[in-house]
Image (tube, rainbow, N blue to C red):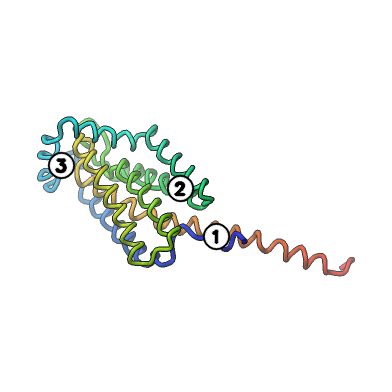
């Protein structure tokens, strides 16, 4: 079995739909970023959601929100990424392990860059809030896991797309609720973080497959080159 036959992390049956979703998600990120660039106050949608959510969270639900928030912090996110990478290696999926690291890193890096470009703040103390990096990370990890499960089980377009979107929705809703409940982000920050993950993960998965296939192609060509060199007459 050659490396060329190794399954990709972006199932072919999902490429079309996820490509469209990624483009739409990127548009949402851009539109929200333009609308709230330089703002330091909640928007109309934020005011409708943030007050009842913040006022209604009490123990034990507050503890749940804090636990979810920890999973988006450096220590918690490192634990999650390490666990998923270990699972990929145990299942002999090096491409999956690369996607976990690259996908999470790209989502967080993109969210961080956008925060500085947009310049939206919360609480009036200069904390950059758009988009939510916690939500982008958690959604990205869920998307990667769903893509790997889809490929491993050989799910079709309908089942695979449903699984990927359901995982993204559940992860984004859970972390988004925690961020709004703790007053760390506005609801529109959460939406921006969720869409950031939807925009970057399909592209990252495609790049991982492309780079891996190219590397395998170069490796497969070497034996043929050596055989051709051996067959050439000496002195020419």
Query: 21 or 141, which lies in front?
Result: 141
Residue at the (31%, 52%) spot, across then down: 167
Q: Is residue 51 left or right of residue 80?
A: left
Q: Please tell me how crowded label 2 is: few (under 14), some (14-19), or many (20+) other residues with Cα within 10 Å.
A: some
Helix, strand or loop for disc 2:
helix
Q: Percent position (x, y) of residue 92?
A: 54, 50
Residue at the (38%, 66%) spot, across then down: 156
Kindly report which numbered mark, 1 or 3, lies closer to the viewer in this rendering: 1
Dot 1 or dot 3: first in sequence order is 1
The picture quadrant where one finds residue 72 is top left
Q: Percent position (x, y) of residue 221?
A: 68, 64
The CA distance from mark 1 to mark 3 is 48 Å
Q: How many marks?
A: 3
Tag 1 and tag 3, C-beta contact below 8 Å:
no
Q: Please tell me how crowded label 3 is: few (under 14), some (14-19), or many (20+) other residues with Cα within 10 Å.
A: many
Q: Which residue is mark 1?
A: 6
Question: Eyeballing the image, is 67 above or below 137?
Answer: above
Q: Which residue is mark 3?
A: 42
Query: 200 or 12, which lies in front?
Result: 12
Residue at the (48%, 48%) spot, across then down: 88
Kindly report which numbered mark, 3 or 2, lies closer to the viewer in this rendering: 2
The picture quadrant where one finds residue 206 is bottom left
Helix, strand or loop for disc 1:
loop
Q: Which quadrant does the C terminus fall into?
A: bottom right
Q: Which quadrant does the N terminus fall into?
A: bottom right
Helix, strand or loop for disc 3:
loop
Q: Which residue is mark 2?
A: 102
């Amino acid at each position: 079995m050659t490396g060329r036959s190794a399954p990709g992390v972006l199932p072919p049956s999902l490429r079309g739909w996820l490509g469209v979703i990624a483009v739409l998600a990127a548009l949402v990120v851009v539109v929200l970023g333009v609308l709230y660039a330089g703002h330091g106050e909640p928007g109309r949608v934020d005011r409708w959601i943030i007050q009842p959510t913040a006022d209604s969270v009490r123990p034990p639900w507050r503890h749940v929100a804090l636990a979810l928030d920890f999973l988006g912090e450096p220590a918690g996110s490192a634990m999650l990424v390490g666990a998923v990478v270990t699972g990929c290696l145990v299942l002999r999926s090096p491409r999956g392990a690369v996607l976990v690291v690259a996908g999470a890193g790209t989502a967080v890096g993109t969210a961080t860059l956008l925060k500085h470009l947009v310049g939206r703040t919360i609480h009036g103390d200069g904390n950059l809030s758009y988009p939510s990096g916690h939500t982008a990370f958690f959604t990205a990890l869920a998307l990667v896991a769903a893509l790997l499960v889809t490929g491993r089980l050989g799910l079709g377009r309908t089942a695979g797309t449903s699984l990927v979107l359901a995982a993204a929705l559940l992860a984004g809703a859970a972390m988004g609720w925690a961020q709004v409940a703790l007053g760390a982000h506005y609801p529109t920050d959460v939406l921006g973080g969720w869409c950031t993950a939807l925009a970057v993960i399909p592209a990252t998965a495609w790049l991982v497959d492309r780079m891996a296939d190219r590397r395998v192609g170069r490796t497969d060509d070497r034996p043929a080159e050596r055989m051709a060199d051996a067959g050439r007459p000496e002195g020419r």
